[in-house]
Every structure is written in C-alpha cells, then in structure tokens.
Amino acid sequence: MKINMNQEIKSYTGETFITGQKLAACPHCNKALPQLDENSGEPLTLKLVCARALTNLTETEAKQLSGDEKAARGVLTLRIFDGPDEVDLKAADIVALKSAIGNSTYNPVVIARAFDMLDK
C-alpha cells in the first residue's frame, strides 16, 4: 500500500505539530495547547514520526530486540526517510511501524494520527 509519508501530524485543535514544540496549559481554559519554543523547527510529519519511533529504542527494546530485528528497523527507516514522498509499505511494515510508534514516547494524539494515516 502506498502511503504519503509527508503528511503533517495535527493536534486535536487542528494545528500542525512542529518539531521542538511543547504543550503548555492555556491560561484561560487550562487545556494543553501546542506552544512554540526557541528550538522549534519543521512540521512534524508521518515520515519523522516513523523514523524516530523505529530508531529511538526503549530500554526494553534495546535489550530484547536481536541484531537482525534492529537492522530490519534500520532498513525500514532508510526506505521511509530516503525514499519518495509515497512509500510502498507491506502489511508487515505497517505492523512494525504501528508497534514502534505505539511503544514510543509520542503523545497519544500523535500516535492516533499516525495510526490513522497508516491505516488509510
């Protein structure tokens, strides 16, 4: 299945998350809203979420994954990051991506948006 990896990840308010963005409480309603800081950069895309989730291993993953499994993650990361905007992913690739993203430290909205993009 071909998936556009340059899709931007949106917050629950519909604003695009920006790399380096933090959440801060709104002074009026106390909801957590995306805030820019001095380290802000580019829009957070599905490509970045996938690459970071595959390569930023949790302590448990670092110990439990074999060298071959880590290498497979690296190969998939390179296919996604170095490939065209639309990447042809197999069902097994999507399962691996969803597992890595689900185990990542991304907030639940980012995870939900990424899952939705991978399922379409």
Image (cartoon, rainbow, N blue to C red):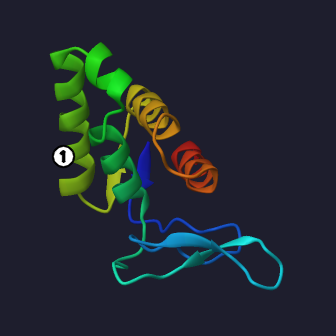
Q: Nearer the viewer, residue 92 or 73?
A: 73
Residue type pointed to by label 1:
Leu
Q: How many marks?
A: 1
Q: Residue furthest right?
A: 29
Query: Residue 40: x percent and y percent?
Result: 37, 79
Secondary structure under tag 1 reads helix
**Circle 1 Cα neighbour tier, 10 Å, few/some/many (<14 / 14–19 / ≥20):** few
Query: Residue 95: x percent and y percent?
Result: 47, 29
Q: Tell whether 18 sits left or right of 29.
A: left
Compared to residue 9, the image places residue 50 above or below, namely above
Compared to residue 52, the image places residue 89 above or below, namely above
Which image quadrant for residue 25? bottom right
Which image quadrant for residue 45? bottom left
Residue drawn 62% across the image and 49% down it: 108
Quadrant the N terminus occupies = top left
Residue drawn 25% across the image and 38% down it: 76
Query: Residue 48: x percent and y percent?
Result: 35, 58
Residue drawn 27% across the image and 17% down it: 63
Q: Nearer the viewer, residue 87 or 36?
A: 36
Q: Residue furthest front?
A: 27
Q: Nearer the viewer, residue 89 or 67?
A: 67
Q: Which residue is labeled 1 in the image?
A: 78
